[in-house]
Amino acid sequence: MTAARLITVGHVTHDRYGDDIVAGGCAFYAARTQAALGADVHLITAVGANFACDDALAGLTVDVTRGGLTTLFTNLYPAGALRVQRIEATAPPIAPPPRLPDAALVHLAPVLQEVDLAAWVAAAGDRPVAIAVQGWIKDRGPGETVVQTPWQVDGALLARVAFAACGEEDLVDQGDLLDRLCRHVPIVAFTHGKRGCDVIVRGRTTKVGIYPHAVEVDPTGAGDTFAAGFFLGLAEGRDPVAAAKLGAAAASVVVEGRGGATLGRVGEAHARVAQIA
Ligand SMILES: Nc1ncnc2c1ncn2[C@@H]1O[C@H](COP(=O)(O)OP(=O)(O)O)[C@@H](O)[C@H]1O
Ligand SMILES: [Mg+2]
């Protein structure tokens, strides 16, 4: 089988872990995941002039605009509570280039409002579009806070999206967003961490489990990696449940290391799929 060509869009970020800065962001996790699973990925991103993680992009085809500051996040996981994110800088938004390469899928994976859905759907033209919802439902709040912001997306625009993925933490304070997604987007995955996910195809839900033998070190990137594998599977023509298993298997590898440390091992996901119920 020839590798599926995917266009993946979003900021590559600097993620702070104590004194270390490592590459992060939904699109970074997604592009590395898709490449590790055998796809031909074209990452379109914007980073600051201070970007210090080019090594993490080695081996990817990257269309990068440099200027301003790199988006900088700190993630905190307080015991028994939801993740707390702090944001110290944001890079400029990512505008679609005048011509996009041919692709089986355009995967939009913003971290924080840097991808304008209407502009990218228009740029995608006939290419199917997939959305990882996370980056549209958060915004920069006062100080260095990240706040949930209701996503008032138009149904007619969502109707131009083929596939969507979101996590249960994304839907806090989002009203009927999941219903709106399921009404307008033919294939939606809704993830629940270690409890697996729901795959919703034209309103019909099927539950998909997790790879049970992962040893979680850091949950960062689970949702991004899941979405990346799920969308790749769909772009390759797998049925939605099989695609969700590929996503779950990919995520199970990523949670085994700090940040993106285990992204290079995501190819192991292919062997894990069979153990997901
Ligand atoms: N500890 C884990 N072991 C195995 N799979 C996991 C684990 N945590 C998450 N996953 C997988 O990753 C998917 C997304 O995780 P989730 O926590 O819902 O995403 P988010 O990063 O958006 O919070 C889950 O549906 C599951 O398949
Ligand atoms: Mg989670």
Image (cartoon, grey):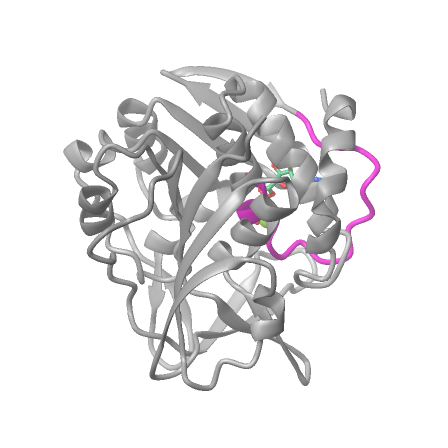
Q: Where is residue 240 drawn, in percent x and y?
A: 51, 20
Q: Where is residue 206 drawn, in percent x and y?
A: 54, 16
Please provide the residue range marked out in magenta: 209-226
Quadrant in which residue 275 is drawn: top right
Given residues 51 and 141, the one toward you in this image is 51
What count of labels does the image hold?
0
Give the quarter of the figure containing the N terminus: top right
Q: Is residue 42 placed above or below 164 in the rendered structure?
A: below
Task: Give the left or right position of residue 238, taking residue 115 as reference.
Answer: right
Task: Give the left or right position of residue 193, taking residue 71 as reference.
Answer: right
At horizontal 68% and vertical 81% (from top left) the residue drawn is 18
Given residues 74 and 41, the one toward you in this image is 41
Q: Where is residue 239 drawn, in percent x and y?
A: 52, 17
Is 213 one of the magenta-colored residues?
yes
Is 88 one of the magenta-colored residues?
no
Give the quarter of the figure containing the C terminus: top right
Task: Give the left or right position of residue 15, taking residue 252 as reference.
Answer: left
Instruction: Please tell me whether the stretch drawn in magenta is mainly helix, strand or loop.
Output: loop
Residue lying at the far top of the rendered structure: 204
At horizontal 46% and vertical 61% (from top left) the residue drawn is 62
At horizontal 36% and vertical 33% (from top left) the residue drawn is 178
Residue lying at the far front of the rendered structure: 2
Q: Where is residue 15 drawn, in percent x and y?
A: 57, 72
Q: Is residue 73 placed above or below 215 in the rendered structure?
A: below
